[in-house]
Image: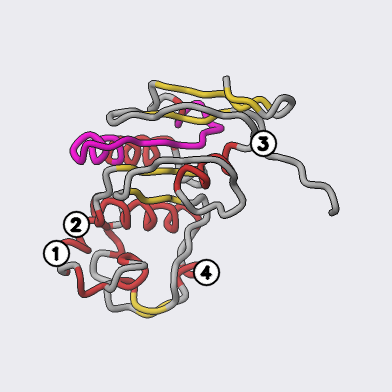
């Protein structure tokens, strides 16, 4: 409408290398907005954010282009930047062994794969590209606890190995357990505690 309402205001904090941080709070409190600001994909923010260059964002509903699986996995990079062995290993590491031999299969992946498979493919994309910083917005909401635990362990190991951090939005206790720092967003005050 005609009224601008800030999703968040007056926030100041730092997330250092080696951090496993989660933003928690009720739906609508601004967690996803804050994560998008930190990841550099929210154009409506005011203020300053200093973020590392080597970072990736995992959405709850990842974008998957139509075409060969190798293109969906490498997106937005060109698939020929990676060897078939690298692509297959990323799929294996993300618990998608049934897709390992489907790299050249053309499909509308957003409607071919289940929600959980789409989320695993998004994690496979991160494992393939090996960013130091990972921003995950409810990236495992469609996964069972065992798969979620395996993938979060993979992401934590990646962040440690690359000298970065894992920053997540988390509603479920199972995700919160993988984070040593938790910030609660208060929807009434629009503040972080």
Numbered disc 2: secondary structure: helix
The answer to which of marks 3 and 2 sits earlier in the sequence is: 3
Q: Nearer the viewer, mark 3 or mark 1?
A: 3
The crowding category of the residue bearing disc 3, from other C-alpha atoms within 10 Å (few below 14, some 14 to 19, many at least 20), is: few
Q: Label 4, on which residue?
A: 111
Q: Are marks 2 and 1 in contact (CB under 8 Å)?
A: yes
Q: Label 3, on which residue?
A: 27
Where, quadrant-wise, is the C terminus in this rendering?
top right
Which residues fall within the magenta stretch?
Answer: 155-175
Q: Nearer the viewer, mark 1 or mark 4?
A: 1
Cα distance between the residues tagged 3 and 2? 35 Å
Numbered disc 3: secondary structure: loop
The answer to which of marks 3 and 4 sits earlier in the sequence is: 3
x, y percentage for residue 89?
Answer: 19, 57
Residue 164 lies within the magenta run? yes
Residue drawn at point x = 30 percent, y = 40 percent: 155
Q: Label 1, on which residue?
A: 85
Which residue in the rendered view is the most extreme toward the right? 2
Cα distance between the residues tagged 2 and 4? 24 Å
Q: Label 2, on which residue?
A: 89
The answer to which of marks 1 and 4 sits earlier in the sequence is: 1
Query: Horizontally, is 72 left or right of 22 in the view?
Result: left
Residue 140 in view in this figure: no
């Amino acid at each position: 409408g005609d009224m601008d309402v800030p999703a968040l205001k007056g926030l100041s904090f730092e997330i250092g290398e080696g951090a496993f941080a989660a933003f928690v709070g009720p739906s609508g409190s601004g967690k996803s907005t804050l994560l998008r600001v930190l990841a550099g994909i929210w154009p409506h923010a005011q203020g300053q954010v200093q973020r590392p260059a080597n970072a990736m964002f995992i959405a709850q509903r990842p974008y998957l282009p139509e075409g060969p699986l190798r293109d969906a996995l490498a997106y937005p990079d060109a698939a020929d930047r990676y060897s078939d062995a690298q692509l297959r290993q990323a799929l294996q590491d993300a618990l998608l062994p049934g897709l390992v031999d489907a790299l050249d299969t053309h499909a509308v992946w957003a409607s071919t794969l289940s929600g959980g498979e789409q989320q695993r493919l998004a994690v496979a994309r991160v494992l393939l590209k090996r960013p130091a910083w990972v921003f995950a917005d409810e990236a495992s909401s469609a996964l069972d606890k065992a798969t979620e635990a395996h993938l979060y362990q993979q992401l934590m190991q990646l962040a440690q190995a690359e000298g970065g951090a894992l920053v997540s939005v988390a509603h479920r206790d199972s995700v919160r357990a993988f984070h040593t720092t938790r910030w609660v967003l208060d929807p009434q005050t629009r503040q972080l505690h």
